Image (cartoon, grey):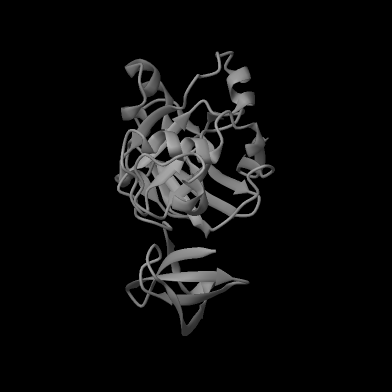
Amino acid sequence: MYVRYIYNNQTHYGHLAKGVITRLEGNMFDSIEPSDETISASAVKLLAPCEPSKVVCVGLNYLDHAKEMDLELPKAPLLFLKPPTTVIAHQNEIKAPGNVGRLDYEGELAIVIGKQAKNVSVEDAANVIFGFTCANDFTARDIQFSDQQWTRGKSFDTFCPLGPGIVREINQDDAKIQLTVNGEVKQSSNIKMFIFKVNEVVSYISQYMTLMPGDVILTGTPHGVGPVKSGDEMSVTIDGIGTLTNTLTIE
């Protein structure tokens, strides 16, 4: 798993395996080489695994979620954006103002782009993907509904936890995704329920905007979306990646 971390007040890229991080030389999305320096993961502070110029999100991309919401299946991916200021790391706090109303979790698989991409075909899309991580598309639901569009309710600072790190490959035909709140399972599905698959999503988005190295695509959330309150701990677990955990603080 590839990670970003702070050690001795410096930011590094590293490769995490069995609790030990090997520091990497260079940029994760260019040429990287392992150094001789290793350190226990418990001795560092993990950062968000990448620094996207944009977070592109797909709405309504699980068959089970569409059924839950009694909505017609989309004919093409439904897109919206979250600004990079929403991005936080594993174990960071999600912070929300006290006047925004209902706040919902949305566990999601995130695609991390590794190469600049424009007008990429479905067949070539895999070549521009660096890897995958866990995400929580956190949402101020009352604002989303009152605005009748998604930007404001999904764009508060800290509303896009990513992590804990990036893996290069997952089983795209069979990977369980689960979200718990305070240890209780709230969402449980499988990415095989995608309406639009990973490569289709990347190709489609690249027809409309240039994807840059480090950009993130959120692929939609399964059934079971619901509200949380201040102090609740949310954990997103995806087969082959790991677990992203964040706690909500209402200020």
Where is residue 155? Give x, y as percent.
33, 35
Q: Is residue 244 above or below residue 58?
A: below
Where is residue 138? Give x, y as percent.
44, 36
Q: Is residue 179 visible?
A: yes
Quarter of the image with the N terminus in it: bottom right
Q: Is residue 230 above or below residue 101?
A: below
Q: Is residue 35 above or below residue 107?
A: below
Front one among 159 and 121: 121
Which residue is at 54% across, 58% downward? 168
Outermost residue on the bottom side: it is: 36
Quarter of the image with the C terminus in it: top left
Front one among 64 and 249: 64
Left or right: 47 in relation to 9:
right
Q: In the rendered picture of this protein, how many numbered marks are placed on residues?
A: 0
Where is residue 177? Give x, y as percent.
63, 42
Left or right: 15 in relation to 119:
right
Q: Is residue 137 visible?
A: no
Front one among 203 and 96: 203
Where is residue 22? Give x, y as percent.
50, 77
Which residue is at 61% across, 48% downward? 237
Which residue is at 37% across, 42% downward? 55
Q: Quadrant of residue 18?
A: bottom right
